[in-house]
Image (tube, rainbow, N blue to C red):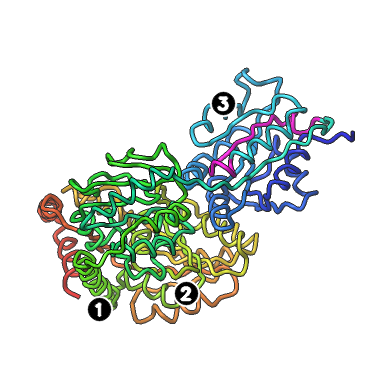
Amino acid sequence: MAKKRVADIIVDVLQESGVQRCYGIVGDTLNYVTDAIRRSPLQWVHVRHEEAGAMAAGADALLSGGLTACAGACGPGSLHFVNGLFEAHRNRAPVVLIATQVASSELGMEFPQEVDLKAIYDTCSHFCAYIHSPGQARRVTALAAQAALNRRGVAVVIVSGDMAQAWTEDALPFRAHHPRPRLLPAEDELDAVAALLNEGQRVAIYAGAGCEGAGQAVTALAGRLQAPVVHTSRAKDFIEPDNPWNLGMTGIFGSEAGFRTLDACDTLLLLGADFAWSQFYPAEARLIQIDQDATHLGRRHPVELGVAGDIAPTLEALLPRLQSRSETAFLRNALRHRDAGLRRRSEDEQPGGDGLIHPQYLTRLIDLLADDDAVFTADGGSPMVWMLRHIRVNGRRRTFSSLLHGTMANAMPQALGCAMAQPGRQVIALSGDGGLAMLLGDLLTAVQESIPIKIIVYNNASLGFVELEQKVEGLLDTYTGLLNPDFSRLAEVVGFLGRKVETADRLEPALREVLAHPGPALLDVKVNRYELVMPPVVTGRQVLHTALYSAKAVLAGRGAEVEAMLRSNFED
């Protein structure tokens, strides 16, 4: 049996497990691993910050459906991945991190750059293990890949620099297995679900990200039950297309129709939905939950019946047990609310007075001009809200944001990963000015790796979502202002095509130019600083606190800001 270096075995196993790309920054303890990658079919994606690399790897895995890798040097190098890996793990993206460590002989000695990586990465992974001896290399790496693929999330392999260069006989052929079983509830459980749905008079469906691949089954179920469908933000891509029963989202970013429908239903069927905010669940309805993960049943809100199953095959087995419903009053009322909401949304998607650019108008233009199969990423905060509300999906488009981890700065690095996963597909990042500035250095990655992403900067010179949160609490907005550069000129210096727009009349031609550019391009758009992100239902508490903010602002000599907020939101 020929001997191999541990680094070569790690790379061999990753390749055999489907990895095509590895994101990272080279350095000291990682050098033998990157040398092994150089001699393999794997592509090394040289990022400028490891956090961006992990976010890119997670988006790559979500879009491609396969395993992706990232790798870091000892201490700070591997540690920088933490936030991006939390993002990937919460999104159930299969990613393996190769985290290298100081020399084995120095472990536990407080050696420079030594960090207890296992204690850290145990908190955001399904698998985290050291390679303690050269003979473990294939086994540990295979188990890591297997955990990431089957449990959908992050796995971490920790290897010391001296271990990576060690030689060993590559004897036992450990490899990652990725079976695809179908999970169905028991027959009596299906009968119980059907009985509750057949008894309901005002049945609604609440669909979550677990409905990926089950859109047609959900639509068929809604038709049989004459039930309106509300969905979580993460289910947008799977539930909105070709679904005449769809009302949109609920929650703070959702629609009034979705909110009122769940509030008024007497029976609610939760499908692959793990929505965390209990105040948006109905107070008195009977709840039925179907989820692939039985540990999710009833963890957000009490349910009367919970069963475990994959959504598409479970609905196929459930459908013959359900009575066709002829009464449509509840559905018709819900659809009237939806149509009224769509008309209001269309009114929001217009240019403002005196050339003011509303972010809703900008997002609608992006929606109209983007490719039919475009991929959109949006920074956590207001760009995420505008994407969820104003980008139309059709079964071919995809949308990504930080909806579970809630981090800043995700849009641009996620766009990098999406573009690497599917070259030739249009990828558009809706970036906040604060989010883009946080990981600005990875604009260089797009240029160095020739990744033709398009970045639209929603430049309101503030941490806009935080500012809104403070105002709703009745507080003066504090420490939210941003002194920004001209992002278009900065992009040009880096190697992008850069354009800047400050008035609505110049927006469409500039956007067309940026989207048509063959390489990386950035459009810096001055949007309304005082735009309000309105929830589906405005409560008295919110009105009171916003009024309190207005009073405080006037007393603090900031009355002009209050006037600008009122004019830009209510006079156009």
Kindly identify the amino acid type of the residue bearing the numbered disc 3: Asp
Q: What separation in Å lies between label 2 and label 3 (alpha carbons)?
A: 45 Å
- Work out whether mark 1 precedes mark 2 in sequence or the reverse, and give the earlier one: 1
Gap between marks 1 and 2 measured at Cα = 26 Å
Label pair 1/2, CB-CB below 8 angstroms: no
- Contact (Cβ within 8 Å) of mark 1 with mark 3: no
Q: Position of residue 533 (x, y in %)?
A: 26, 60
Q: Quadrant of residue 211?
A: bottom left
- Tag shown at residue 116: 3
Which residue is located at x 27 percent, y 46 percent? 287
Q: Looking at the rendering, which quadrant does residue 460 occupy?
A: bottom left
In this view, the mark in front (1 or 3): 3
Q: Is residue 158 magenta?
A: yes
SS type, badge 3 = loop
Q: Amino acid at mark 1?
A: Asp
Check disc 3: other Cα within 10 Å, few if <14, some if 14-19, many if 20+.
few
Is 185 left, or right, of 279 in this rendering?
right
Quarter that holds the C terminus = bottom left
Question: Mark 2 = which residue?
Answer: 370
How crowded pointer 1 is (Cα within 10 Å; few <14, some 14-19, many 20+) is rated as few
Query: Residue at left 72%, top 31%?
Result: 161
Query: In the image, residue 81 lies at what x, y percent?
Result: 55, 41
Q: From the viewer's perspective, is residue 498 above or below residue 269?
A: below
The amino acid type of the residue labelled 2 equals: Ala
Quick one: SS at disc 2?
Answer: loop
Is 395 on the left or on the right of 200, as rendered? right
Q: Which residues are drawn in magenta?
A: 148-166
Q: Which mark is residue 354?
A: 1
Q: Which mark is residue 157?
A: none
Q: Nearer the viewer, residue 28 or 391?
A: 391
> Image height check: is 36 above or below 264?
above
